[in-house]
Amino acid sequence: KNEVEQSPQNLTAQEGEFITINCSYSVGISALHWLQQHPGGGIVSLFMLSSGKKKHGRLIATINIQEKHSSLHITASHPRDSAVYICAAHQNDKIIFGKGTRLHILP
Amino acid sequence: EAGVVQSPRYKIIEKKQPVAFWCNPISGHNTLYWYLQNLGQGPELLIRYENEEAVDDSQLPKDRFSAERLKGVDSTLKIQPAELGDSAVYLCASSAGTVETQYFGPGTRLLVL
């Protein structure tokens, strides 16, 4: 079992829908990253958080340390949001990556 | 500000040949990472540098892989000899510190025939 699990693995939604991607981890962490990777493109860091909630534009990331769970939300989704979203947990000086959630937003 | 630069972007080689990848991190970033990413998977850490010191190379297959960061800035990752299973994207990332936001390069897509 991977120490960082994401769900769903794949998600297809219509433009405008509210999107939630979940990340659960089984280890103690000091921080958690949400990353975005477009097809054939590099990885972009969206958020790094260790508690509470962060918002950037239409993206919101939350983390619940007690429940070892984080969510990434996208409001008013758009086809350009189509990408792979990866959750990565900082454990001491190691980083453990989830396998990613492939999101496809249909116009 | 320039991001993390990697070259080449693509490389096709025959098995048993050597290959090298180069990474130039963001200026001032002391921490540099090399990752391997297979299709449909998240990145897997190969090696992490703090300045010129490799502080975590536990996942680096040392029989064929080597890396260096001689002056604590640019880094190279080498595979010799390459095997078919080494086909993947090799990502370089840098950060200002260990638990800081990582900035990723575009990656080098390696195909071993």
Image: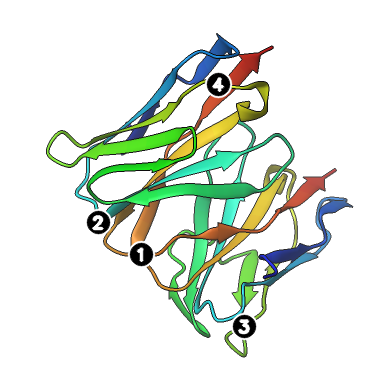
Numbered badge on residue A77? 4
Task: Using the rendered image, report if marks 3 and 1 lie on a common chain.
Answer: yes
Query: Does the CB distance between marks 2 and 1 fall below 8 Å?
Result: yes
Q: CA distance from mark 4 to mark 1?
A: 30 Å
Vertical arrangement, residue B49 with respect to residue A67, above or below: below
Q: Residues within 10 Å of mark 3 (few under 14, many from 20)?
A: many
Residue located at (59% from left, 65% from top): B63
A74 lies left or right of B37 = left
Number of the front mark, 4 or 1:
4
Task: Using the rendered image, report if marks 4 and 1 lie on a common chain.
Answer: no
Tell which subunit mark 2 falls on: A
Q: In this figure, which residue is indicated by the disc labeled 1?
A: B99
Q: Nearer the viewer, residue A86 or B53?
A: A86
Q: Residues within 10 Å of mark 4 (few under 14, many from 20)?
A: many
Q: Give the structural element (helix, strand or loop) at label 4.
A: loop
Splitting the image into 4 quarters, where does residue B97 fall?
Answer: bottom left
Tell which subunit mark 1 falls on: B
Q: Residues within 10 Å of mark 2 (few under 14, many from 20)?
A: some
Q: Residues within 10 Å of mark 1 (few under 14, many from 20)?
A: some
Numbered badge on residue A30? 2
Residue located at (62% from left, 88% from top): B70
Q: Nearer the viewer, residue B110 or A64?
A: A64
B76 lies left or right of A92 = right
